[in-house]
Amino acid sequence: MPTWVVVTTALIGAFVIWRVGIAMLRSLTMSRAPGSASDEPAPDEPEDVDDLGVYLVCGECGTELRVSRLGELQIPRHCGEKMQVVRRPEPA
Ligand SMILES: [Zn+2]
């Protein structure tokens, strides 16, 4: 076997091993990133908004929900529509 064949084969082999190693590393890091709850940052403490008079109002049927503690702001739906956030500070 001529020397150049040996060298070329070795280079190709090294290249393949290098690519496979990168692909394995990438799949390892990819599989760890999404889905696992342990890596996600802890949610912030819910804010106490009981004194602010925050209400969630349904524009369709008029249902009102009083918000006493506000965590991550996600507007719930009622009657298929997003509820409106209304502030009604209680008169002092
Ligand atoms: Zn409604």
Image (tube, rainbow, N blue to C red):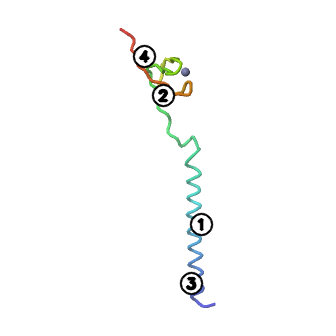
Per the image, the residue denoted by label 1 is 20
**Label 2 neighbour load within 10 Å: few <14, some 14-19, many 20+:** few
- Classify residue 78 by image quadrant: top right
Q: Residue at x 57, y 82 (%)?
A: 8
Instruction: Give coordinates of residue 70: x percent, y percent.
Output: 47, 25
Crowd band around label 1 with a 10 angstrom C-alpha radius: few (<14), some (14–19), many (20+): few
Seen in the picture, residue 58 relative to 5 is either above or below; the reply is above
**Element under disc 3:** helix
Residue shown at 58% from the left, 65% from the top: 21
Q: Which mark is residue 7?
A: 3
- Pick the front one: 70 or 32: 70
Q: Secondary structure at mark 1?
A: helix
Q: Amino acid at mark 1?
A: Val
Mark closest to the chain's N terminus, 3 or 4: 3
Q: Position of residue 38 (x, y in %)?
A: 56, 41
Nearer to me, 38 or 26? 26
Whichever of callouts 2 and 1 sits on the residue coming sooner in the sequence is: 1
Quick check: 48 above or below 5? above
Comparing marks 2 and 3, which lies closer to the viewer?
A: 2
Q: Are marks 3 and 4 in contact (CB under 8 Å)?
A: no
Say which mark, if any, is on residue 71: 2
Q: Which residue is mark 4?
A: 53
Circle 2 — which element?
Answer: loop
Looking at the rendered structure, the kind of residue marked 4 is Gly
CA separation, marks 2 and 3? 63 Å
